[in-house]
Image (cartoon, helix red, strand yellow):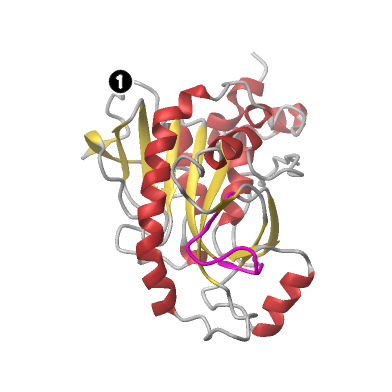
Amino acid sequence: MKNIGTQINNLIETGFIGGSGVYELEGLKGVETIEIETPFGKPSSAVTIGSLGNIKMAFIPRHGPEHSLLPTEVPYRANIYALKTLGVERVVSVSAVGSLNEKIKPLEVVVPDQLIDRTKARENSFFGDGLVAHISFANPFCQNLSKMIASFFKDLEIEGHDSGTYVAIEGPQFSTKAESNLYRMWGCDIIGMTAIPEAKLAREAEMCYATIALVTDYDCWKDDQENVTANMVINNLKQNVKTSKKLINKIAENIDSITKECECHESLRESLVTQRILNNQETAKKLNLLLKKYIPG
């Protein structure tokens, strides 16, 4: 196991964050594990790096290698910062979700394009302590990366949806029937517990971010199915993991086809007040990885 202080030969442009059921990536070559300490503590686990397809990638299991972290306990800031430390520019997350839409069935895949935040107990920004940033978050997922992922559905014979609104709840409890029906009234399509604050933090870190949302159940709004249980979710997860592996391999083969020019990589440019950086050097030093290209001199 290497420490981050060890020389990394090449920056790693693509990172994957594994959700429930996805705790490792199969087929990686030249595998190394790296311990990374960030200003926000340690990530969920050591970061695994290796080659797959045409790229060198980094991988973090969001809930830890043994799924020991509740959604609220995940060190989201440390995870994103650790990937940024390695040079990652694009992050693909894998997440288990419930369906709030009759047309989106269990075992199908959604690449969401919108988010509603219903979390309440999470650190969702790198900023504070004198530094203020207000990023644009109208389109919370990278459109270029999401479009590429959805384009693989047909070739891989995956039943998928190239858009949808994801409502993120705090958990770890599943929603009540009243909540589930409320989210349906809002026009939400899927429900999960982890896209927030990952998407917000990735945008602050100027990284492209997209989610492969694997549908395990119909949440609890659907009267003609049994209530959602952990066992139900786990059983469908096993099948969904196979789907996620196919998609991850396809992404690795084609990720270089995406243009490197993306508005995600400039998200802080109009969001910072330079004078606040100059007046808060201690905090700015802590966030140097994010701010260095905007600090004069």
Asked whether residue 107 is drawn in magenta, I would say: yes
Kindly identify the amino acid type of the residue bearing the numbered disc 1: Asn
Q: In the rendering, at what x and y percent does residue 82 appear?
A: 43, 40
Q: In the rendering, at what x and y percent does residue 36 appear?
A: 36, 41
Q: Relative to residue 256, is residue 80 depicted above or below?
A: below
Dot 1, crowdedness within 10 Å: few (<14), some or many (≥20)?
Answer: few
> Visible in this render: residue 250?
yes
- Front residue of 134 and 108: 108
Asked whether residue 73 is drawn in magenta, I would say: no
Q: In the rendering, at what x and y percent does residue 274 appear?
A: 74, 27
Q: In the rendering, at what x and y percent does residue 39 appear?
A: 48, 43
Q: Which residues are magenta?
A: 98-111
Quarter occupied by residue 105: bottom right
User: Which residue is identified by label 1?
Assistant: 9
Q: Relative to residue 78, is residue 223 depicted above or below?
A: below
Magenta stretch: dominant secondary structure: loop
- Residue at the image position 75 percent from the left and 34 percent from the top: 271
Q: Secondary structure at mark 1?
A: loop
> Visible in this render: residue 44?
no
Q: Identify the image quadrant of the C terminus.
A: top right
Q: How many marks?
A: 1
